[in-house]
Image (spheres, rainbow, N blue to C red):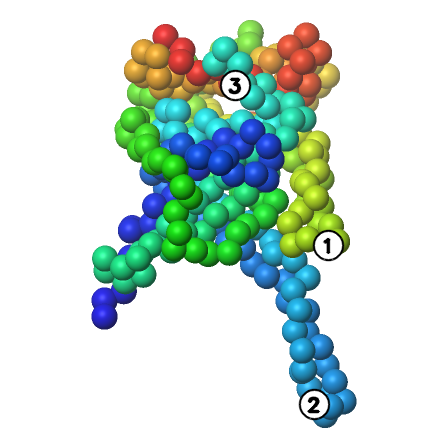
Amino acid sequence: MAGTASSQLRSAHILEATPGTIPATPAFTTLHAPARLTGTPQTLEGRSLVAKGGRLGRGINGIDVTGTLEDSLKYGVYDHFLATLLQGTWSSDVLKDGKAQTTVAVENALPAGVGGTSTMMRFRGVEAVSGTLNLTARQAAALNLTLAGLGSDDATTTAITGATYTDPTVVDPLSSGADVGTIVFEDITLDCMQSLEINFAFEGRDLQPKISSNDLCGITRGDFLPVLTANIYLEANFLEIYNAARARHDPFSVTIPLGSVTGEKYTIEFPRCHFASTSIDTTGTAAMQNVTIHPEYSTSDSATVIITRAVA
C-alpha cells in the first residue's frame, strides 16, 4: 500500500477567544506551510525488584506542545501568529508588542495512505514564542517562528461539528527585492543593503507546567529584546554609522516597508533604536559593514515595535 505524503497535510488555524479552548464551531483558515507541532508525552517509568531491577510500570508526567512554522512571508496569511508572537492584537490594522495572552488553535489533518481516512491532531493555546524575519538579496522574505502550546487533544478521525475551512486568498510570497521599500534609519543616509535580519527575541518566555493536568498553566510573557542585524556595502556613507556606534548617540527610528501591492503592504517600525556594534568585513569579494541595532521601548508609542498592515 502506498503511503501518504507530507504534501497531503492540511494545516489550519483559528484565533482563540479563550486561550487553550478551541471555538465550538471553528472557522479555520488553512496555511500554505504547516505549523509543525508535536504533542510529545513526557513518560514516567517504574523500576521494580519484582522485575529484577528492570522496568515495570509506566505513567505520563505531561505532554509538551512545541514546533515551528517556516515559510516565505505572504501578506495576511500569518497575521494571527504575529499577534501571538508580539502578545498583542490587531487594532485598526496596527499591531504593537504587549503582554496579552493571544493564542491560536491549530488542527493538522493527514490521510492514512492514499485516499485514506484523515487523522486530525489538534493543538490548543498555541503561541509563537520567538521568531525571525530575514530579508536577504535575491531571496524571499523568510519568516521563521518557534511555537509552543498549552495543550493537545488525542488524535481522532472525527471532525469538529460545524467546522469550516477557508484557504488564504494571498498566494504570492514577498521578495527581498522590489517588495521591500526604502529602509530608513532616521537622520542617517544608508548605502546599499545586502541583508537585514529582524530577530524578535525574548528572554524568559518559558513553559509553566502544573499538577493535575497534562496541559500547561501558561507561558510566561518574558522580556522582549529584539535585535536587528544589517549587512551594508561599504560605500560613501559608512563613516556616519561606524563612528556613531563607537560613542553615545541619540536614539533613532528604523522603518522597514514590505510589499508592493496597494492595500497589501506592511510597515515595520522600531521607533527608538541604538547601535549596538558595527564592524568592517573584508573576507568576501565585497567589503561589508556589519551593523547590530538594539531597539528599545518607546514611552511615547507604548511599544518597542509597531507593525501596520493594509498600507496603501
Under circle 3, the secondary element is: loop
Q: Position of residue 102 (x, y in %)?
A: 59, 30
The residue furthest front is 161
Q: Which mark is residue 90?
A: 3
Q: Badge 2 is on which residue?
A: 51
Foreground of the two, 126 or 265: 126
> Would you say residue 181 is visible in this rendering?
no
Vertical placement of residue 3 versus 194, above or below: below
Q: Identify residue type, mark 2.
A: Ala
Instruction: Examine the rendering and report whether any part of residue 123 can be seen.
Output: yes
Disc 3 and disc 1 in contact, CB within 8 angstroms: no
Q: Where is residue 93 drawn, in percent x and y?
A: 48, 14
Would you place residue 56 above or below residue 259 in this image?
Answer: below
Q: Which residue is mark 1?
A: 212
Number of labelled discs?
3
Question: In which image quadrant can residue 175 be found?
Answer: top left
Q: Are there few (<14), some (14-19), or many (20+) residues within 10 Å of tag 2?
A: few
Which comes before the other along the chain, label 2 or label 1?
A: 2
Please state which amino acid type lies under the numbered disc 1: Ser
| Residue 238 pos. (x, y %) | 52, 19
Residue at position x 67%, y 21% in the image: 296
